[in-house]
Image (tube, rainbow, N blue to C red):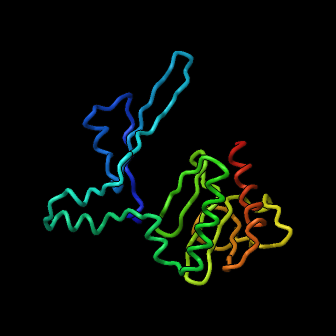
Amino acid sequence: MDWTQSKVLFISPQFTTYQRQSIEFKDLPFELWEIRKYSNNTIVMNQHRSTSQESVHTIMPTDDRLDQVKKEIIIYTEDYHLEKGSPATIELYQEIKARVLDMGEFDMNPTKFYIGFKLHKKVVTDIELQKKQLRMRINLKKGQLEDPNQMFEDVSEKGHWGLGDYEAKINTDPDVDYLMSMIRQSFKYYSEG
């Protein structure tokens, strides 16, 4: 079990002000979700989100136990992944990221190995930054991606990070318009589903 990727979800009909304030730090591995059930048996869940960019580490006193816990709990961020890239791959990543975020209401989800772009809680695509290239996965099952230029490889029978059965190794001079047409297929699949 990789505990660095663990997160605790608290689900309740309501939270106190103190409880809502507890998530006002960017690097805590827990979330607060309010759940409501209406008379027509509809259930709605709303996540309380932090509006702060302050780190909990700036206000906590230091002691040996706390330092040990800090070493075990790692919150992965976009900056963590950018450190793995080169100026060329970072520039390409930023261009792709901007175009993906322009498509819809995405949430970025940095994990230990990649940055996922989620739509309605489903990862549409994920990107792994490397020095010489980007590795990008499209979250579609084998046979669902129309890729006439064969940019993406079928990795359904191979071990790989990320979600989906398609992966491309993208150099620093790809056809970004074609690449976006591949991502749009996954976007369309998850926005309609």
Residue in the foreground of this view, choosing between 1 and 187 = 187
Q: Quadrant of residue 127?
A: bottom right
User: Can residue 1 be spotted in the picture?
Assistant: no
Q: Is residue 68 left or right of residue 110?
A: left
Q: Is residue 5 left or right of residue 63?
A: right
User: Can residue 42 be spotted in the picture?
Assistant: yes
Q: Position of residue 158 (x, y in %)?
A: 66, 74
Depicted 142 relative to depicted 53: above or below: below
Q: Residue at x 48, y 63 (%)?
A: 111
Q: Quadrant of the C terminus?
A: top right
Residue at the extreme bottom: 132
Residue in the foreground of this view, choosing between 96 and 188 = 96
Q: Residue at x 72, y 42 (%)?
A: 192
Residue in the foreground of this view, choosing between 169 and 142 = 169
Depicted 163 relative to depicted 24: above or below: below
Q: Quadrant of residue 89?
A: bottom right
Q: Position of residue 26 (x, y in %)?
A: 36, 54
Q: Quadrant of the N terminus?
A: bottom left
Q: Position of residue 107 (x, y in %)?
A: 54, 51
Q: Is residue 9 left or right of residue 85?
A: left
Q: Residue at x 68, y 48 (%)?
A: 190
Q: Quadrant of residue 63?
A: bottom left
Depicted 42 relative to depicted 113: above or below: above
Residue at the extreme top: 39
